[in-house]
Image (spheres, rainbow, N blue to C red):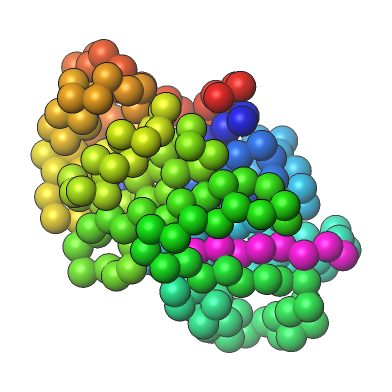
Amino acid sequence: MDIELIGTGAIYSKYNNACTLINEDMIVDVPNGVLKQLLNLNCIPEKIDKILITHMHGDHIADIPFLLMYMYKAKEINRKTSIIGPIGIKNKVEQLFEVYDYHLLSKISEYIKFIELSPNEIIEDSEINYKIQAVSVLHGNEKPAYGYIVNENLGITGDTSLCEGVEYIMQNSKIIIADCSRINGDISHMGIDNLKYLTEKYKKQIFTTHVKDETREELIKLEISNISVEDDGFKIYNL
């Protein structure tokens, strides 16, 4: 797998919100502004036919209508896009289109397939072309919130505190893209202290995302082994 960190920041940072592109055809979370960020990074949004959502906060789903409009209206593609996420994602996307006051959804609904996953459910079929396991994580009061394991190689924590789900992802992945919003973790987000514990325990490579600016500065200063702090657009090849 080839991976590109489209966004590595959090809401209140100068970096783009957390978003990951896998093999050019699957995007993990679709935060506000990500369509323009994809274009700025010379990615090809119309290649995306799988949208994987960790949870339904606005900074993870806000650009879904604009991405779909770009693909189906501007580029006039005619194949299906699978939107994969927690139970309730179909209703939430429909609400987004309604709030944004676009009528495109009814026109493109035949091209959208929703796949709502239960906690710890695994999907693996020829249409998706990936093995994806949903792993329940704890993100404050937001339920459900998932991390994912993709092809038994890549772990993505989503937004989460340190919890059993995160430890499961660490155990069952080769590299991990992990929430590191805080300097010290809390009930909603992991911090530097949590990631230091995880990399010392599991000896795995962690790439940080959802990072606040002050946390990024501290991470760079500390230079912790096996914890990589990368800019938007960083690429990982041949995982």
Relative image position of residue 173 (x, y in whole percent): 40, 33
Q: How many marks?
A: 0
Classify 109 as above or below 48. Answer: below
Please name the residue shown 34% across and 27% down the image: 206
Quadrant for the N terminus, please: top right
* 119 lies left or right of 92: left
Quadrant for the C terminus, please: top right
Classify 210 as above or below 159. Answer: above
* Magenta stretch: includes residue 231: no
Q: Magenta region's main secondary structure?
A: strand
Q: Residue 218's quadrant in the figure?
A: top left
Classify 182 as above or below 78. Answer: above
Q: Residue 54's quadrant in the figure?
A: bottom left
Nearer to the camera, 74 or 80: 80
Please name the residue shown 51% across and 70% down the image: 116
**Magenta region:** 78-85
Relative image position of residue 195 (x, y in whole percent): 21, 31
Nearer to the camera, 202 or 36: 202
* Magenta stretch: includes residue 82: yes
* Residue 218 can be seen in this image: no
Relative image position of residue 193 (x, y in whole percent): 13, 32
Please name the residue shown 32% across and 23% down the image: 204
* 3 lies left or right of 48: left
Relative image position of residue 160 (x, y in whole percent): 26, 51
Please name the residue shown 76% across and 48% down the image: 47
Nearer to the camera, 56 or 9: 56
Q: Residue 203's quadrant in the figure?
A: top left
* Residue 152 can be seen in this image: yes
